[in-house]
Image (cartoon, rainbow, N blue to C red):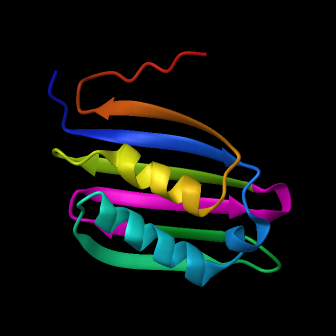
Amino acid sequence: MRTMGRHVIAELWDCDLEKLNNVQFIEQTFVDAALRSGAEVREVTFHKFAPHGVSGVVIISESHLTIHSFPEHGYASIDVYTCGDLDPTVAANYIAEALGAKMREAVVVPRGMGPVIVGA
């Protein structure tokens, strides 16, 4: 079945605390993840919070990659949404490995197919 896109929503736990708080590392990781998936990077914006945490987005021609990190909990939430033939799991897996996530949960949501139903 053809979709307009696929959206990976991932929970990353027990990540490397220093990496979760390093805005330069996260920014480069997200750009690299986008490129590895075959995406075309358009804009990059990341913000380091005080005392800790990073949020950011990589806008790609095919949609976006985002993160909100919580170093104090060893946790990051990420989204990778791609349209067309790109596989968003390539980027999501690269990010999880780069951040050293020991536990991860991910849901892949097809986009553009009608109502979204998420199971409990």
Q: Is residue 66 above or below residue 106?
A: below
Of residues 35 and 11, the one drawn nearer to the viewer in this rendering: 35
Q: Which residue appears at 61% of the width and 16% of the height? A: 120
Say whether residue 85 is magenta.
Answer: no
113 relative position to 101: left or right: left
**Over which residues does the magenta segment extend?**
58-74
Side of 35 relative to 89 (left or right) = left
Which residue does the image show at 48% across and 60% down from the upper left? 66
Left or right side of 56 for 59: left
Quarter holding residue 32: bottom left
- Number of marks present in the image shown: 0
Looking at the image, residue 50 lies above or below residue 38: below
What quarter of the picture does the N terminus occupy?
Answer: top left
Q: Nearer the viewer, residue 16 or 79?
A: 16
At 69% from the left and 68% from the top, the residue drawn is: 20
Where residue 16 appears, as percent x and y from the top left, is 74, 63
Q: Main secondary structure of the magenta part?
A: strand
